[in-house]
Amino acid sequence: MVRRPVEGEVHVHYGQIYVESDPDSFGPGLAEAFAGQTSGLCGAAIPGALWLTTGLHTGSVGFTVEVHDEAPPVDAVWEEVVEVSFRPVSGRSSLTEWAGQDSWELDLAEIDYRVRHCGRGMDPARRQDTRLAEEPQVDSYLLQLWPAPPAPDRVIRQTAEIAAYWHDYARQQSARPAPEPRAGAERQVREAR
């Protein structure tokens, strides 16, 4: 069985859109989202959030979200394919545009998911940079989720130069500290102030 809570076009700014589940958070930061990962297209290092990278800088892209009962096969139509693990931190998960301009409820359970982020047309979209309303769609994306235990992120398919750039960026980010040492470090900074 497959459920499609998002199907059509979404608007991106700065080549990004997010999945958010923490009502007290305002999205992940770039370096923090990809800390310790090998994939630069779907940042999952922040609990309860995903940073999704697009080729287009600004404008509308094709975007579908599918929630499956089990892992679907990888479709050959997708030029870029990465996988990460994700667990919502609340019962309210949404696909959210930059600065919260619009969002779509995903209705995800608070369980572990495997996430596959697929894309096509990333290099032509990057060269175009901005898509105006009357222009044809350049790039499109598919985000698939299914219940699965946590596993390392991985790049399944990479063809675009811009995807290679973002994968390289992710590989240069240090691993994110564990929650307790991070909380302790943040506490020390607050006390020092």
Image: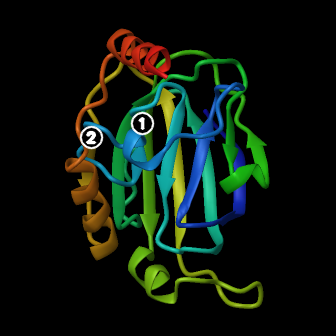
Is 153 placed above or below 108 here?
below
Is 156 placed above or below 146 here?
below
User: Which class describes the residues within 10 Å of circle 2: few (<14), some (14-19), or many (20+)?
Assistant: many
Residue type for callout 2: Gln
| Residue 172, image x, y percentages | 20, 50
Which comes sooner in the sequence, label 1 or label 2? 2
Asked if one can make out residue 72 in the rendered structure from this viewpoint, the answer is no
Q: How many marks?
A: 2
Going 47% across and 19% down the picture, which residue do you hit?
112
Residue type for callout 1: Ala
| Residue 83, image x, y percentages | 35, 42
User: Which class describes the residues within 10 Å of circle 1: few (<14), some (14-19), or many (20+)?
Assistant: many
Q: Which residue is mark 2?
A: 37
Q: How far apart are labels 1 and 2 at the CA level?
A: 8 Å
With 103 as the anchor, is 172 left or right in this view?
left
Asked if one can make out residue 80 in the rendered structure from this viewpoint, the answer is yes
Going 76% across and 84% down the picture, which residue do you hit?
133
Could you tell me which secondary element the residue under label 2 belongs to?
loop
Going 39% across and 80% down the picture, which residue do you hit?
123
- Picture quarter with the N terminus: top right
Disc marking residue 69:
none
With 122 as the anchor, is 166 left or right in this view?
left
With 160 as the anchor, is 56 left or right in this view?
right
Q: Nearer the viewer, residue 4 or 160?
A: 160
Could you tell me which secondary element the residue under label 1 belongs to?
loop
For the residues labelled 1 and 2, say whether their Cβ atoms are less than 8 Å apart. yes
Going 49% across and 19% down the picture, which residue do you hit?
190
Q: Nearer the viewer, residue 1 or 105?
A: 105
Work out which residue is located at the far front of the displayed protein and give it. 193
Q: Which residue is mark 1?
A: 44
